[in-house]
Image (cartoon, rainbow, N blue to C red):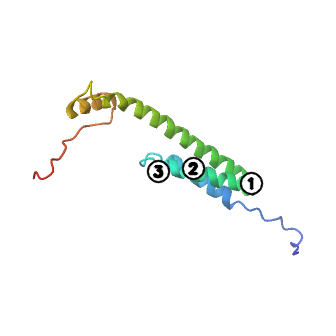
């Protein structure tokens, strides 16, 4: 067993805690990139749990896990909102044509704009 020289504090390992914190911040930033933040948030929570178990950067690990959980919560709320807005437009009895469904989507989802559907073989 090796002893440290007198006067030097023991080395603190924080690598996993830092990684969990970085993943938590990245999850919030990348959430708008087609939901990529969800995968990053899951990774942040997993790394945070490992850091807590190994006592490796405890404070940063907890912060990273909280940020990752916040990103997941935001993603769930946004997904529920989005799908509740578009679900009525898929009712073919109320909106029989594509143009009717597109009009419904334009009305219910503020950032949706219908475009022309290309016809195969037409130039």
Q: Position of residue 70 (x, y in %)?
A: 57, 41
Residue 26 in sight from this viewpoint: no
Q: Residue furthest left?
A: 123
Q: Which residue is mark 1?
A: 53
Of callouts 2 and 3, the N-terminal one: 3
Q: Quadrant of residue 90?
A: top left
* Label 3 crowd (10 A; few <14 / some 14-19 / many >=20): some
* Label 1 crowd (10 A; few <14 / some 14-19 / many >=20): few
Q: Position of residue 15 (x, y in %)?
A: 67, 61
Marks 1 and 2 in Cβ contact (< 8 Å): no
Instruction: Determine the CA span between mark 3 and mark 1.
Output: 26 Å
Q: Is 101 left, or right, of 61 in this rendering?
A: left
Q: Is residue 66 above or below residue 2?
A: above
Q: Is residue 51 above or below residue 112?
A: below
Q: Callout 3: helix, strand or loop?
A: helix
**Quarter that holds the N terminus:** bottom right
Q: Which residue is mark 2?
A: 42
Residue 89 in sight from this viewpoint: yes
């Amino acid at each position: 067993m090796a002893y440290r020289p007198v006067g030097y504090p023991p080395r603190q390992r924080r690598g996993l805690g830092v990684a969990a914190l970085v993943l938590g911040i990245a999850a919030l930033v990348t959430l708008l990139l087609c939901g990529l933040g969800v995968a990053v948030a899951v990774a942040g929570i997993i790394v945070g749990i490992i850091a807590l178990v190994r006592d490796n950067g405890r404070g940063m690990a907890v912060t990273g896990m909280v940020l990752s959980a916040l990103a997941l919560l935001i993603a769930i709320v946004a997904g529920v909102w989005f799908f509740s807005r578009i679900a009525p437009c898929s009712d073919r009895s109320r909106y029989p044509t594509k143009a009717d469904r597109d009009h419904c989507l334009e009305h219910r989802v503020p950032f949706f704009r219908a475009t022309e559907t290309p016809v195969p073989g037409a130039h």
